[in-house]
Image (tube, rainbow, N blue to C red):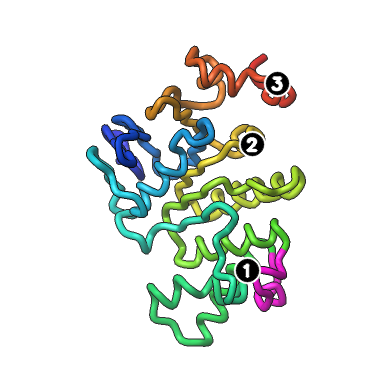
Amino acid sequence: MPETPAIHISNLVVGFGKKIVLDHLSLDVNDGEILGLVGASGGGKSVLMRTLVGLLPKRSGQIDFASASDNERHWGVLFQQGALFSALTARQNIQFPLREQARLSPRLLEEVADAKLEMVGLTREDGDKLPSELSGGMTKRVALARALALDPSLLFLDEPTSGLDPIAAGEFDTLIRTLHRTLRFTVFMVTHDLNSLQAICDRIAALADGRIAAIGRLSSVLKSDHPWVQAYFHGARAQKLGLGN
């Protein structure tokens, strides 16, 4: 029997007022994979992610999570730009979900937070810094450490390399792939970064016209004849990466 997907989405409808953003969208996210979701700006990528994590209501349709990922404690979320609490240090940001969800002594809170800092390539000294003192890459790493604080089985990433220079973005992609191989969680990643799609995604889902227009490995998605998918994966930027040839 096939394994139950980590996320099963069927005929999902989400809208604002009279505008329908997701129009009977269906999608399975396989257990243990990194799925990259692409789509036009304003096309509903972040809306889908925010609906999955419960920040936006759905009008109709079904969203099912595998038993290992059926509650918030088993999810980690990295929002665009990190979304760190500006008045808290990096360490305190990482400790926030631990304080909310787990009963740990002050000593254990310190030890877990420091372990997560090390996991994402930061130091204990970095943990003392406020968000305003962090570079863009460090902010993303702290946000990732916070998302991993509760050892989730399912990780949501919203534009994780947005705002990073190519070197920092490449390093962050490598970090995600390394952690994924080590910790074996499932990743649902919203991105527009062609490098990320090529480097770390097991499958790619293309969102267009409120639905999944193409899905599969990169080689399969490249063969789609959908106009938006063709324009995205066969445009000038894709050509520079050797895609769409």
Q: Is residue 229 above or below residue 203?
A: above
Spatial separation of the CA atoms under disc 3 and disc 1: 38 Å
Looking at the picture, which amino acid does disc 1 mark?
Leu
Circle 2 residues within 10 Å: few <14, some 14–19, many ≥20: few
Q: Which mark is residue 125?
A: none
Instruction: Give, as a three-letter code, the residue at label 3.
Output: Ala
In this view, 10 is above or below 220? below
Image mark for residue 236 = 3
Specify which label sits upstream in the sequence, 3 or 2: 2
Residue 242 position, x and y percent, is: 71, 22
Residue 218: where, in percent of width, then height?
55, 25
Q: Which residue is mark 1?
A: 117
Q: Earlier in the sequence, mark 3 or mark 1?
A: 1
Quick one: quadrant of the C terminus? top right
Which amino acid, by three-letter code, is at mark 2? Ala
Q: Residue at x 56, y 81 (%)?
A: 110
Q: Residue at x 70, y 72 (%)?
A: 126
**In the drawing, what numbered circle is on residue 199?**
2
Residue range in magenta is: 122-134
Camera-near label (3 vs 1) is 3
Q: Nearer the viewer, residue 190 or 200?
A: 190
Out of 176 and 168, give the one closest to the viewer: 168
Drawn side of residue 243 relative to residue 165, left or right: left
Cα–Cα gap, marks 2 and 1: 24 Å
Badge 3 marks a residue whose secondary structure is helix
Q: Secondary structure at mark 2?
A: helix
Q: Is residue 157 magenta?
A: no
| Quadrant (top left, top right, bottom left, bottom right) of the N terminus | top left
Q: Is residue 141 left or right of residue 45?
A: right
